[in-house]
Amino acid sequence: MGLKIEYIEGQTPLDEDEKEGLLVKTISTKGELDEFEQLNIQSAIEWSLKTKVGKKQFLTEDFLMLVHKKMFGEVWAWAGTKRKSNKNIGVDKTQISIEIRKLIDDCNFWIDHQSFTDEEIAIRFSHRLVKIHLFPNGNGRHSRLAADIMISKLFNRPVFSWGHSDLSKKNPIRKEYLDAIYKADNDDYKPLLEFAKK
C-alpha cells in the first residue's frame, strides 16, 4: 500500500526513495507517522537534556547530524544523513556541507564577538539551518531542537516555547510561525524571536 502523506504549507515532500527508508513498515498514514516521529523526538529531547555539550562540540556538522539521528533514527533509515535530492526549499544538495561550514563559522563569530543577544544567535542559527535544509525531512523540528540545545547548553537560558503549539499541524500558530520565518528570510528576525519566546 505504501505511505500516503498529505503535505501542508511549509512541509518538504519526500521522494519515493526517501519513503522507502521508513523503518516501521506498518505505518501507512500521516497521523501514524506523526505519532511515531513524536515518540522518537521526545526521546531525543530527553537525551539532549542529559547530554553535556559545549560550543566546540555543538558547532560541528557531526553533532548536528547526531541530533537529527536521535530525533528520527527509530523511524527513518536516512535519519542523520544529508539529503541526496534537491527540494522545494534549501540550498543545492552539493552545497550542504559548504553552507553548514559557513553557518558554523558565522555562529562562532557571533558568539565570540557578542554580535547579537544569546536568543538572537540561537534563532539566527536555527533559521539558517532551515534555509540550508540538511535532511530529506524534519528540518524545522531539527532546527528548533538545535536552537533549544544551543540556548540551554551554551547560554544557560531556558529553552524556547515556540508558540506552545505543535508546529507540524495546520493551525493559526503554524501560520504565524511560517510568516515569521518568511520575514527572517528577508533579514527581519524580530517576529521569529518574539514567536520563539511567546
Image: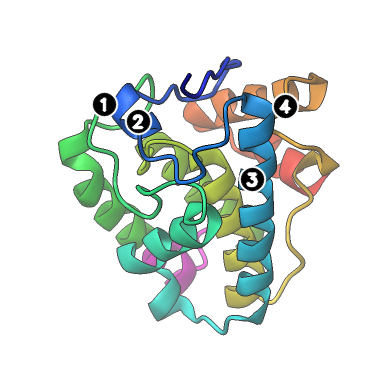
Q: Which mark is residue 169?
A: 4
| Residue bearing mark 2 | 90
Q: Earlier in the sequence, mark 3 or mark 1?
A: 3
Q: Residues within 10 Å of mark 2 (few under 14, many from 20)?
A: some
Identify which residue is drawn at 58% across, 44% down.
141
Identify which residue is drawn at 57% across, 27% down.
28
Residue 168 seen in the current view:
no
Toward which corner of the image does residue 176 lie, by quadrant? top right
Q: Residues within 10 Å of mark 1 (few under 14, many from 20)?
A: some
> For this view, does 64 lie left or right of residue 144?
left
Identify which residue is drawn at 57% across, 84% down.
52
Nearest to the observer: residue 31 or residue 146: 31
Mark 1 residue element? loop
| Residue bearing mark 1 | 86
Toward which corner of the image does residue 35 lie, by quadrant? top right
Q: Position of residue 22 (x, y in %)?
A: 44, 40
- Alpha carbon separation for disc pair 2 and 4: 21 Å
Q: Which residues are magenta?
A: 108-117
Q: Which mark is residue 36?
A: 3
Mark 2 residue element? loop
* Amino acid type of the residue tagged 2 in the rendering: Gly
Identify which residue is drawn at 47% across, 56% down.
73
